[in-house]
Amino acid sequence: MKKKIGVIFGGQSSEYKISCISAANVCENTDKEKFEVVKIGITPDGRWWLYSGGTDAMRLDTWADDFSLLRPAVISPCKAHRGLVLFDGVSGSFEILRLDAVFPVLHGKNGEDGTMQGLLSLAGIPFVGCGTCASAIAMDKAFTKTVVMQSGVPVVPFISAVKGESAGSIADRAEKEYTYPMFVKPANAGSSVGITKARGREELIAGIKTAFDNDYKLLVEPAVSGREIEVAVIGNGEPFASVCGEIVPNSDFYDYETKYIDDRAECLAPAPIKPQVSDAIRESAKKVYIALGCAGLSRVDFFLLPDGSHMLNEINTIPGFTPISMYPRLMGCSGIDYKSLITKLIDLALERSENE
């Protein structure tokens, strides 16, 4: 009998549209001989729907326009249900649709940060990806670096601040530590949302305000002169690290527009770097993954410095699955094709659930 796999997409996040595109690819590449896909969409205002339409509408963000394809549905936190509660909007009645596992294709806040993982854990439903604690820590760039430093993997230096401290005070602290240019980042936003490059104090103050518009906490980091190297990691207790890939932004830095709108960035897979350098970065990727308690999958991003050393930039526990995303590309270069990758991720989720 086919296992029912819920694919959750959309969500209340600045990365809502990227989630819809990623989820469409995941749905299309799920092995239909082994699994039955149950599509669960969350609108930007937080409404949950069982969606019975096609993936093209997900990509175009028109999936929620046709109410004949939608039925109100939510994940029940009750382990006796272990699945979705489906509502009848007319009669007020409901029914339960049990799920064997869930693939939360939710990028950023309210999906990648431990919130969805906590709900699925309460519900007793196996899910693809990291658990609640690892997801929450990895989502916070400051917490990530604090934990990773204990593993011996170098990280990009940073100072952090929370709302309440004035922009001037934060700027004063940053200027004591670093020279310009600097980067200002929201601590809990992905895909370079809200990140600015500051070349002087005026831009630094503006960047701090922008970061606080996106999160209650921020980081200020010195600009690092290095190549952007990414590694895809998969597994539970014994993770596997893919070949290294390289991002060539062809812009001032790899921001949201460069990633998804302008289409200027080049993604090189494998990265044109020396084998010994690649091996060292892959080992560091596994150390980061283990230190944070990751499971299922993550993409680990580094800077490769001119002297051949490297340092952690950040980790993404639900990396993109869009046509240009590095995670599936790097796994493909490492011998795991797209359909096999989705199957393996679901199998890892079921395996972890059995061992917990």
Image (tube, rainbow, N blue to C red):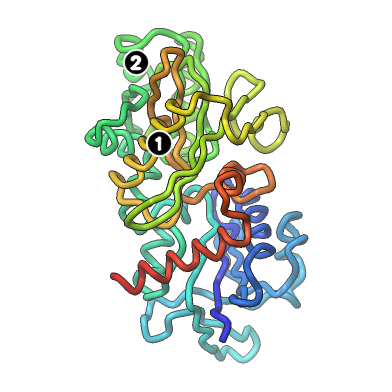
Residue 347 appears at what percent x and percent y?
47, 68
Instruction: Give the quarter of the figure containing the C terminus.
Output: bottom left
Image quadrant of residue 241? top left
Q: Which label sits on residue 187?
A: 1
Instruction: Give the quarter of the figure containing the N terminus.
Output: bottom right
The answer to whether any part of residue 216 appears in the image is no
Query: Closer to the camera, 322 or 114?
Result: 322
Give the alpha-carbon distance from disc 1 to disc 2, as whole Å: 16 Å
Mark 1 residue element: loop
Residue 284 relative to residue 30: left or right: left
Residue 173 relative to residue 280: left or right: left
Image quadrant of residue 123? bottom left
Residue 326 relative to residue 210: left or right: right
Mark 2 residue element: helix
Q: Residue at x 63, y 32 (%)?
A: 268
Disc 1 residue type?
Ala
Q: Which residue is mark 2?
A: 174
Q: Residue at x 50, y 69 (%)?
A: 102
Q: Earlier in the sequence, mark 1 or mark 2?
A: 2
Residue 32 appears at what percent x and percent y?
66, 74
Q: Which label sits on residue 77?
A: none
